[in-house]
Image (cartoon, rainbow, N blue to C red):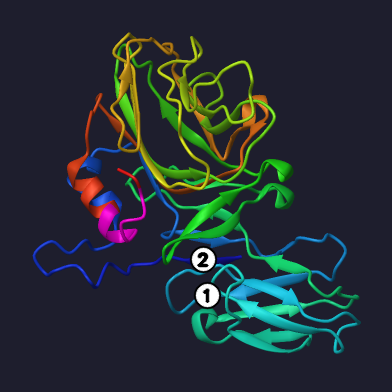
Amino acid sequence: MIARRAVHGNRRASPLNRFNGNFAGLPSFAAAYQVLQFDRGATYAGTLHDVGGAGPVITAAGSLTGPPVPIWVKATSSGALGVWTYEIYYDLGSTPAMSGISTGTLVLTGAGDGVTLTINAGAATSGNFWKLKYAAIADQSPNNKTALQVSAPAQPLFGLLGTRTTATFEASRSTYLRSPTLALPAPATTPHSTYLVFRWTGTVGTQAGVFGGSTGHAFYSRFGNPTNANDPTMYNNGAFANGQAGKALNQWYRAIVNWTGSTSDALKVGSTAAVTGTNAGNSADSDMSYGGVASIAFPANVEIALVAWVPGAVASFPDVDSAVSQYFQGIVQL
């Protein structure tokens, strides 16, 4: 596995308001239960995902010397090792950074500097991709509530929001990351909130869980579900509550979810006003999963850049919103 903790900030911001790149250091997240920032504290899985499923195994080792990047290998011709040719991408397949004839050991350069790929024997097919995956993402709060995935087939891919890495979850592979030690209180006793930067990347047949715990707290999309036009919606073992219609695929949103165990529960996604008035339920929770609700098998096509859980029913996060706008180059709808 390859560990990488990025510490870069936004060099284009003025010295007076420059964000240092660490969302966990912002005042609104000072008492957070968990802060997952998907370009900090990432552990790369040792084996790349073979998209076609029939090519040679490619593994990665080492440590990046620069910021985290997606690493893709593309076969540009077919044949055995030493015959088939490759391209390396760090930008999700737009512009190749390296190319050549396949070899058993491939030392990456440029943005991949510090990483070495091992390509096993076997025939490759032209057009196939191998893509680097997350094995874990470290909690940036002091609480050490890491999210991880030990099952290789269920590990999510690296994506990009602007120039920052994100986690890309695929319903077809039922990918998710799990925080088994994150415990959330019953919200009627201890209200709390979720701050999320995400986008939906595809539809599913029924509801799809952006995140969800073992007994309650869940945030669903309803793309493709004809029985419920509201999308998205919150749920905490009580009711699908405070749904919002009209959200778009592939648009990056900031969502704020207030968990109160009462009709003060609220959901705000993007620039539209918060929807409130319906109680989603009052369950305590544990074993949170991201990219799907693992406890009830609702995988999602979703991409996540940032998620944080904080105490209190917090209606707005001005400092975090400002940092999100800077860090993600104004792409996220706030």
In the displayed structure, 314 sits above or below 174; it is above
Return the x and y of residue 240 as percentages of the image width and height: 49, 15
Is residue 307 visible in the rendered image? The answer is no
Return the x and y of residue 54 as percentages of the image width and height: 88, 63
Left or right: where does residue 264 sit relative to residue 145? left
- Name the residue at 50% across, 76% down: 64
Q: Amino acid at mark 2?
A: Ala
Left or right: where does residue 260 sit relative to residue 283? left
Q: Residue 3: give its label.
A: 2
**Structural crowding at the residue carrying mark 2, measured as other residues with C-alpha within 10 Å and reported as few (<14), some (14–19) or many (≥20):** many
Q: Quadrant of the rendered structure where residue 296 is?
A: top right
Q: Amino acid at mark 1?
A: Ser
Q: Which residue is mark 1?
A: 63
- Give the position of the N terminus as an image quadrant: bottom right
Identify the magenta region: 325-332
**Structural crowding at the residue carrying mark 1, measured as other residues with C-alpha within 10 Å and reported as few (<14), some (14–19) or many (≥20):** some
In the displayed structure, 38 sits above or below 132; it is above
- Name the residue at 28% across, 27% down: 273
**Magenta stretch contains residue 185:** no
Q: Distance from label 2 to label 1 (Cα)?
A: 6 Å
